Amino acid sequence: MYNSETTGFLRPHYLIFSTILKNTEMDKFSSEKRSQIMAKVKGKDTKPELVVRRLVSAMGYRYRRHRKDLPGKPDLAFIGRKKVVFVNGCFWHQHPNCKRAVRPTTNQSFWNGKLNRNIERDRQALADYARMGWEVLTIWQCEIKNLDDLQSRLADFLGPPPNHKSRSSTSH
């Protein structure tokens, strides 16, 4: 085969057409349907986030949600412990080596820009927390399946839950 960039020869027509077909793959949904689907995507209170919040509450921890005064508005903030938890969607935050983090082949300039900005925003938030002396745990959407492992990771990260003495156990 001839390399058109180095030799100046044209590529065979079947290579040109295969390249064109790869770059113009059609979305399986119409643009109206795709717009409806994308409009339903939520930024907070997602199912993975709700799973993590319920688990953390059941473990006895108390937290604040989506603190606007903290970098990246973490999903869970443990202010007294100086720790935050982000529950990231594998696609939206491009979880490395995850099958859910495949970039769309249509409208690549839009998606690459959007996803790259998300990645950069995440990096900046991590750097800000490091400067502040806070610890960060990122939980990926695909890691939610195994609740025992998730509970163990959370307990290791957060440390012992606070001891709440019930009023009925105190002597009068």
Image: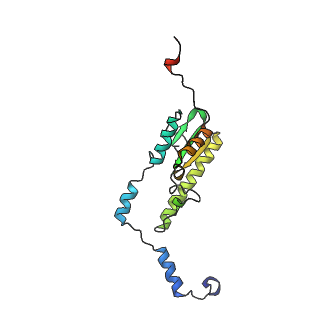
Q: Is residue 66 above or below residue 169?
A: below
Which residue is painted at 62% across and 84% down in the image? 3
List x then y, in percent, for residue 92: 50, 56
Nearer the observer, 152 or 10: 152
Q: Quadrant of residue 4?
A: bottom right
Residue nearest the viewer, comparing 149 with 54? 149
Position in image of residue 27 (x %, y %): 41, 68
Q: Residue furthest left?
A: 32
What residue is drawn where x is 65% and y is 42%?
131
In the image, what residue occupies the spot 36% across and 58% down?
36
Position in image of residue 79 (x %, y %): 56, 34
* Coloring applied to the structure: rainbow
How many marks overall?
A: 0
Residue 59's place in the image compared with 45, above or below, is above
As drawn, the residue found furthest toward the top would be: 172
Q: Position of residue 119 (x, y in %)?
A: 56, 55
Reply above or below: 67 against 102. above
User: Is the N terminus in the top left, top right, bottom left or bottom right quadrant?
Assistant: bottom right
Q: Is residue 48 above or below residue 37?
A: above
Question: Residue 3 vs residue 91: left or right?
Answer: right
Asked whether residue 71 appears in the rendered view, the answer is no
Q: Is residue 130 visible?
A: yes
- At a point 52% along the width and 38% down the height, the residue shown is 56
Q: On the picture, is 44 further left or further right than 125?
A: left
